[in-house]
Image (tube, rainbow, N blue to C red):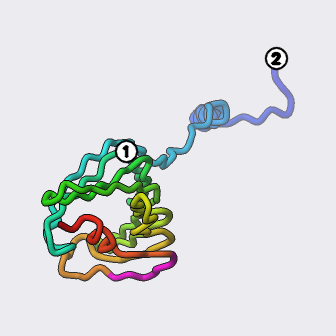
Amino acid sequence: MQRRNAVRLPRKRALAAAVALVALGGLALAPAQPAASARPTIVVQEVDFHQSVPFLCGFPLERSVTGTEKTIQYSDGSYRVLALDLVDTWTSPLTGKSLSGRSVGMTTYEIADDGTVVQTIVGLSERFVVPGAGAIVLVAGRFVFTYNQNDPTVPRVQLQDAGPREGLRGLCPYLEP
């Protein structure tokens, strides 16, 4: 039986057209693949940091920072460090006196390809309270610094300082021998 108005294609063209239709149909029916998301990497870690600080007050001090912090690393290389529960303790080995404070701030690091870092500290960074005397050291607010992590000869520069900021030297009278 012969069909009327049928278009006859050469055999090779007909085969190529059929393959193309099947391929296009397969693409239309194939489930869409989700785009690769750039999800941040999150790490919660224990902090147990200790250092000797011989020159802050003119007599030796020991510092320890313990607790938990969360680091969020983004695909562009920037990251945030959240102090979940950090306790900063300063001790005078000469007197045995110590003073502890909590840090509940957030520090953000934006790192450029050349190693330039913009560090932003927001929140309560340092707070030390002496019973009966109140807060003797308070560092809170928003502080922005820049430095180059690849070149230690480039000085750290403060770009913004907003909020109460009393230096750690406020610890000295309380801890002195």
At 50% from the left edge and 44% from the top edge, which residue is drawn? 36
Q: Answer left or right for 149 relative to 160.
A: left
Find the residue positioned furthest to the right: 4
Residue 22 on image: x %, y %? 63, 31
Instruction: Decide if residue 14 is in sight here.
Output: no
Q: Main secondary structure of the magenta part?
A: strand
| Mark 2 or 1, nearer chain start | 2
Q: Answer left or right for 134 relative to 14.
A: left
Name the residue that disc number 2 marks: 1
Camera-side residue of 137 and 19: 137
Name the residue that disc number 1 marks: 68
Q: Is residue 23 magenta?
A: no
Q: Residues within 10 Å of mark 1 (few under 14, many from 20)?
A: some
Q: Is disc 1 placed on a helix, strand or loop?
A: strand
Q: Amino acid at mark 1?
A: Thr
Find the residue positioned furthest to the top: 1
Q: Look at the image and give the residue range highlighted in magenta.
A: 157-163
Residue 159 on image: x %, y %? 42, 82
Tell how many labels.
2
Q: Answer left or right for 61 relative to 115.
A: left
At 14% from the left edge and 70% from the top edge, which residue is drawn? 59
Q: Quadrant of residue 74?
A: bottom left
Q: Amino acid at mark 2?
A: Met
